[in-house]
Image: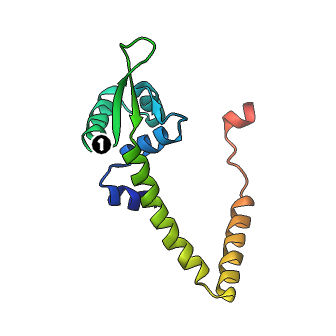
Amino acid sequence: MRRRTRDSMAMGENELLALRYLLRQPDHSARPAELVKYLGVTSASITTMLDRLEKTGRIERLANPTDRRSIFVRATPHANEEVRETLGRMHGLMYDVAVGMSPEAQEHVVEFLRQMSDAVDGVDPVVTEETVDA
């Protein structure tokens, strides 16, 4: 779904992750250093990515209100609407498929997912020397 969202919005993986990170913040903003840490990339990569996002109108750079020297980046209302519209459309299509299934087909899917969950839940954690020593 993320790949389809990226493709629909003509964005790279890190651009979408950064945008979603910003949109989860209370004021839709963060310092570039927070994005560096979150994405695990270099400051130079973040700067290049932010340049692209700013050029497409998805973020804006703002002076830090406390010191006016450092900057914050904030997702624009346009970006918020674009992400919500794209994901909303995809969620709607998936919902239509789910409700369009017969009750019998729904039961088969639920049973399949239950069995898959049980199979994974039954897997013991990997034991290494580090876990044994801990």
Q: In this view, does 93 lie above or below 20?
A: below
Asked whether, in this view, residue 64 is left or right of residue 91, the answer is: left
**Mark 1 crowdedness (10 Å alpha carbons): few <14, some 14-19, many ≥20:** some
Count of numbered tags: 1
In the picture, residue 63 is in which quadrant? Answer: top left
Asked whether, in this view, residue 94 is left or right of residue 117, the answer is: left
Image coordinates of residue 32 in percent, x first then y, are 40, 27
The residue depicted at 39 percent of the width and 62 percent of the height is: 4
Image coordinates of residue 18 in percent, x first then y, are 42, 40
**Pick the front one: 113 or 100:** 100
Q: In this view, does 53 lie above or below 33?
A: below
**Pick the front one: 46 or 124:** 46
Task: Give the farthest residue toward the left.
Answer: 55
Image coordinates of residue 96 in percent, x first then y, are 54, 77
Label 1 residue SS? loop
Provide the residue designation for mark 1. Answer: 57
Q: Which amino acid does label 1 sit on?
A: Gly
Asked whether, in this view, residue 5 is left or right of residue 127, the answer is: left
Identify the image's colour scheme: rainbow, by chain, secondary structure or one colour.
rainbow
**Pick the front one: 3 or 80:** 80
Image coordinates of residue 62 in percent, x first then y, are 36, 25
Rendered-image quadrant of the C terminus: top right
